[in-house]
Image (cartoon, grey):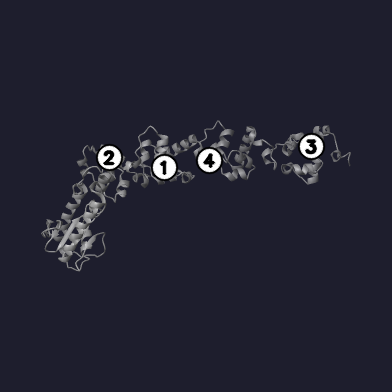
């Protein structure tokens, strides 16, 4: 038995330097393990070899079962990645990496390089490529670029890429440029028209969720630093931008250049429409949707007269038209002085006992340019006196806040809530429900 199987007894190291002895041993071991095909040697382990008289054999082959099998049975087309115990440094050898990928591509049915853009992590993990995948930080672009450098790989076309790939500023810039080129085919100025939804759809890997600092403005400045970008023109300009007084000042300085405003009084001609048309909706939201309030608050050094602003002039014109529409030729007295010591009322319909006032911002908000809180308190006291007097004389008093348009529907619906019978022109029917007014009702 010992003569037939000499490895069962101690042998000098030179014994294992004889490849024929090694071949005989592996053939015997395969029979002992019940192997019926050479493929089963892929599952051979060091422990099995060492426990079957081969402890002196493996050191001759760098302690690698794969190297042992491939060197001794070198007439077989071995695939080293299929060994359960893969050779050490296997994936550091470009030849084996390339051979593995060519084999994997055939296994996956790939017919050209573009097919590799669909590769998924499990394609490596389920096909003997775990170590290659981990060694390259789960980055298929890196794996394929090194194996097939002659092909012009586009990293952003891969369905899977690790977020860590963007840790490089160069790669971050490349990715953002690729996305923006797709969103803005006409050039960088189109960036102002890109919406957050557009960007989210282009970000198929949802990387931006973990990078909230990457706004449209940040992208623009990174890719085109030479351009003078205007923060308020971006579709994702945050509300926090308008909370900074200096930003509001910058915006109005820019708006002045657009409308060629050279004197403070020219601002009276700027209203909600002009600001909205030039990307200032955020500014309006900050100042209760009021262009006069925004202008007076940001440019607080000028002694403003709120009633001179374009929007208020239009409101007065609209109210006059509304009164004519509702009451026909009913006499309307403007700047009605109810009694000495009571300030004048803007509009009064004597026969109906209806008094109306269009409030300016200084009657609702503490406008710094007009004296702030003390002025607001004085305005409120003034209105309180009016309300008290009109209530005592049985008149209806309607105050219309700065953000309310005094159209026919608005006035009809609010006035109709009173018990007093009011006949509108053409006897139109009236729906009754609460409007955003402050109104004094006679007791």
Residue drawn at the location 23% of the way across and 48% of the way down: 370
At label 1, counting other C-alpha atoms closer than 10 Å, the crowd grade (few under 14, some 14-19, many 20 or more) is some
Going from N to C along the chain, the mark reached first, 1 or 2, is: 1
Q: Which mark is residue 57?
A: 3
Element at label 3:
loop
Is 322 above or below relative to 93? below
Element at label 1:
loop
Q: CA distance from mark 1 to mark 2?
A: 23 Å
State the image coordinates of residue 185 (x, y, percent, origin top left): 39, 37
Q: Nearer the viewer, residue 338 or 198?
A: 338
Residue that badge 2 annotates: 255
Element at label 2:
helix
Q: Which mark is residue 13?
A: none
Residue drawn at the location 27% of the way across and 40% of the way down: 255
Element at label 4:
helix
Q: CA distance from mark 3 to mark 2?
A: 85 Å
Nearer the observer: mark 1 or 3; the answer is 1
Q: Is residue 79 visible?
A: no
Residue that badge 1 annotates: 215
Q: CA distance from mark 1 to mark 4?
A: 19 Å
Residue that badge 4 annotates: 164
State the image coordinates of residue 425 (x, y, percent, origin top left): 15, 62
Quadrant into which the C terminus falls: bottom left
């Amino acid at each position: 038995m010992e003569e037939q199987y000499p490895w069962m007894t101690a042998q000098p190291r030179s014994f294992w330097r004889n490849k024929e002895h090694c071949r005989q041993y592996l053939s015997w071991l395969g029979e002992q393990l019940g192997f019926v095909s050479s493929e089963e040697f892929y599952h051979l382990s060091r422990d099995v070899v060492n426990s079957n008289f081969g402890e002196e054999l493996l050191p001759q082959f760098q302690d690698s079962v794969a190297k042992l099998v491939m060197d001794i049975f070198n007439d077989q087309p071995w695939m080293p990645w299929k060994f359960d115990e893969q050779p050490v440094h296997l994936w550091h050898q470009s030849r084996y990496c390339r051979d593995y990928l060519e084999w994997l591509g055939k296994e996956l049915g790939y017919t050209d390089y573009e097919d590799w853009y669909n590769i998924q992590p499990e394609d490596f993990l389920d096909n003997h490529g775990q170590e290659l995948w981990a060694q390259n930080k789960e980055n298929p672009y890196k794996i394929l670029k090194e194996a097939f450098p002659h092909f012009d790989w586009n990293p952003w076309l891969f369905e899977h890429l690790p977020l860590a790939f963007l840790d490089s500023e160069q790669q971050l810039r490349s990715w953002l440029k690729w996305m923006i080129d797709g969103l803005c085919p006409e050039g960088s100025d189109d960036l102002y028209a890109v919406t957050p939804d557009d960007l989210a759809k282009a970000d198929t890997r949802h990387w931006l969720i973990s990078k909230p600092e990457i706004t449209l403005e940040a992208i623009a400045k990174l890719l085109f630093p030479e351009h003078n970008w205007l923060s308020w023109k971006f579709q994702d300009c945050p509300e926090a931008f308008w909370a900074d007084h200096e930003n509001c000042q910058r915006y109005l300085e820019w708006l002045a250049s657009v409308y060629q405003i050279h004197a403070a009084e020219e601002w009276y001609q700027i209203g909600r429409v002009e600001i909205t048309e030039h990307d200032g909706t955020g500014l309006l939201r900050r100042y209760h949707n009021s262009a006069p309030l925004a202008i007076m608050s940001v440019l607080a050094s000028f002694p403003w007269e709120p009633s001179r602003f374009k929007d208020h002039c239009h409101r007065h014109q609209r109210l006059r038209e509304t009164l004519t529409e509702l009451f026909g030729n009913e006499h309307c007295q403007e700047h009605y002085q109810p009694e000495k010591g009571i300030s004048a009322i803007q509009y009064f319909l004597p026969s109906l006992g209806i008094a109306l006032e269009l409030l300016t911002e200084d009657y609702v908000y503490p406008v710094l340019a007009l004296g702030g809180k003390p002025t607001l308190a004085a305005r409120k006291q003034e209105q309180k006196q009016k309300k008290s007097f009109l209530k005592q004389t049985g008149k209806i008093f309607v105050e219309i806040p700065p953000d309310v348009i005094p159209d026919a529907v608005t006035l009809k619906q609010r006035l109709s809530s009173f018990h007093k019978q009011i006949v509108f022109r053409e006897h139109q029917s009236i729906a009754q429900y609460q409007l955003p007014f402050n109104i004094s009702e006679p007791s």
